[in-house]
Image (cartoon, grey):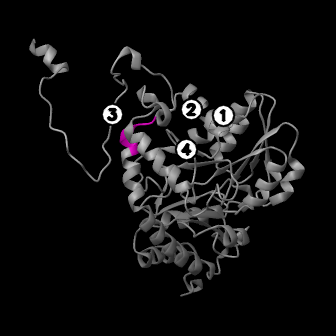
Amino acid sequence: MNWRTKLMHPGRTAPDGFESLAVPTYRGSTVVFPSQEGVRDGWQVHETSYSYGSYGTPTTAELSVRLAELEGAQHTFLTPNGQSAIALIHLAFASAGDHVLLPRNAYGTNQDIASGMLARFGIEVEPYDPLIGAGIAGLIRPTTVLIWCESPGSITMEIQDVPGIVAAAHERGVLVALDNTYSAGVLFDAFAHGVDVSMQALTKYVGGHSDLLLGSVSVNSEIAYAKVGEAHRLLGMAVSPDECALALRGLQTLGVRLEKMEASALRLALWLAEQPMVERVLHPALPSCGGHEFWTRDFHGSASLFSIVFQEGTTQEQANAFVDALRLFKIGWSWGGTTSMVMAYPRLKRANGKLVRLHIGLEDAGDLLADIKGALQLTFSTDVIRA
């Protein structure tokens, strides 16, 4: 053969037999078939094997089956990020003329999808009080097809009575979807509590190092599997095997990271609850958080995320000054990684601009406490800090 042909068709290859603890990263768009008779075309790689890179490689399939096993799901679909996972669920289950219920504390982009794209498609999305529980039955219409839950809410941290909402929804033939990112799919067992569809922003805890963008949608019925799978195919929601390899690595340390973050977050939350300039600490494990009784009943632990609400009279300038005075906490939208993060929410009407959200990373808890104490002393009177 000409050397140019050998570039594509080498006569010598590396030996087989290398077995590693790491999942190989398979990159590829084209799947090669053994014969024309064996050509396939379909997204169900777990039933019909691989047919095209958009539908998955062994790397992406490995991540999806591991996530499904952790969540107790029948199948998990991967998406480019958490936002696309949310959009996928809406578009898989809702059509023009349908009605969807969404809690007021839902992730902002979920609300934006509802008021923007879905409204243009003729899908009505109605906000509801996240603490309504079984009372949601009064909001269900004949056209309601989907009820969203987000528990806890990612800013104001309300914990929902998910089993109560599920019971009311299923009695009327309505599906329930849950944004389960806070729980990393493990601190709250969505499917054991009757949820039909669970999604995560894998960008957060599963990725764990602030270096990837991925989302997941897990289902537990054949009907949901077919609907989400077909929508996933038509929307072309392919994911990078390199991102999946990072997520597979992140899964291996998820347990120790969550345990460390939980302990540090609780220590800081309890200390902040004693400070006179703090009106409330919104941490699911504390009674001051809305729906705390449901956390006690339904959850296996808490995570790294909580918010503080400063006392009445605190100005937005003071809240901003507190955030800016922190040195170990970085200012940014995301959370779930190894580095502690902080963000103020000046336009959040429910907190009158006094709310600051904290994500507690893997730094030493004593150093983080000293950082918070120093920022409070710079922002407020130094003689009101309690030990």
Kindly check if marks 1 and 2 are in contact, taking CB atoms under 8 A apart as contact.
yes
Question: Magenta region's main secondary structure?
Answer: helix
Kindly check if marks 3 and 1 are in contact, taking CB atoms under 8 A apart as contact.
no
The residue that disc 1 covers is 92
Say if the magenta span includes residue 210. Answer: no
Residue 222 located left or right of residue 75: right
Q: Can residue 15 be seen in this view?
A: yes
Image position, residue 192 (x, y; %)? 65, 59
Image position, residue 222 (x, y; %)? 64, 39
- State the residue in front, 86 or 59: 59
Is tag 3's residue or tag 1's residue first in the polypeptide sequence? 3
The tag on residue 27 is 3
The tag on residue 232 is 2
Q: How far apart are marks 2 and 3 (CA)?
A: 20 Å
Q: Quadrant of residue 379?
A: bottom right
Q: Is residue 27 above or below residue 272?
A: above
The residue that disc 4 covers is 75
Label 3 secondary element: loop
Give the residue displayed 68% in from the left and 53% down from the top. Answer: 347
